[in-house]
Amino acid sequence: MPDHLALRPVTEADLDAFDSAFQSESGATPHQWFGFTPNIALREALRTRGLLAGADNMLSVTVDGELAGRVEWLERRWGRRDTSLCWEIAVGLLPDWRGRGVGTRAQRELVRYLFTHTRVERVQATTDPENTAEIRCLEKIGFRLEGVVRRAQWRGGRWHDQLLFSILRDEFGLASG
């Protein structure tokens, strides 16, 4: 298993590496390939706010100083704007880093970061029912399956169901051991 995993702010070079790696279904994985998308807004968000302190945020994942991927967190609301914010997390690993436990460790560190530095009570994640690696990852961290969000994601020319998982602040304290 890789030694030192860290989350750090994204750089322009990181975005270049993500653009290069995720330009195909094999690079992005079938569960994350949404076709070619413009990256102008992402680069503008990096320039203006470092991809932090917004409704959509990103950190780079490094292992022993080498870029391994990225984690993201997005605002989601389950009620009134001022009182019902939670974060939804996602991970994207560069192909060479998949299947090595990096995704689990990176998402665990992101959850720890969010519960330490924001006031949210809930962090959630969604994934395709066929994405068994991500399901195992979320369960290892302590996320609980809440249900199926039917035909929620358009990808590959058809609608896909998504599984909704969540972890609460006090549950993470127990799960992160």
Image (tube, grey):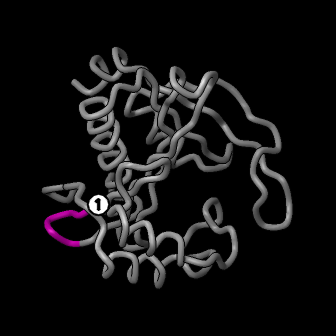
Farthest residue toward the right?
A: 158
Residue shown at the point (67%, 48%) measured from the top left: 130
Assign the C terminus to one quadrant of the image.
Answer: top left
Residue shown at the point (53%, 71%) measured from the top left: 41
Disc 1 residue type (three-letter): Val
Assign the N terminus to one quadrant of the image.
Answer: bottom left
Q: Position of residue 5 (x, y in %)?
A: 20, 55
Instruction: Check the image and report above or below for 83 versus 12.
Output: above
Instruction: Check the image and report above or below for 17 versus 64.
Output: below
Foreground of the two, 164 or 95: 164
Foreground of the two, 59 or 93: 59
Circle 1 crowding by C-alpha within 10 Å: few under 14, some 14–19, many from 20: many
Q: Is residue 74 left or right of residue 176?
A: right
Q: Main secondary structure of the magenta part?
A: strand
Residue shown at the point (41%, 21%) measured from the top left: 121
Point out the stretch of residues depicted in magenta: 62-66
Residue shown at the point (24%, 55%) measured from the top left: 7
Q: Position of residue 61 (x, y in %)?
A: 29, 60
Instruction: Tell me how many marks there are.
Output: 1
Give the residue number, with chain letter if any, for mark 1.
61
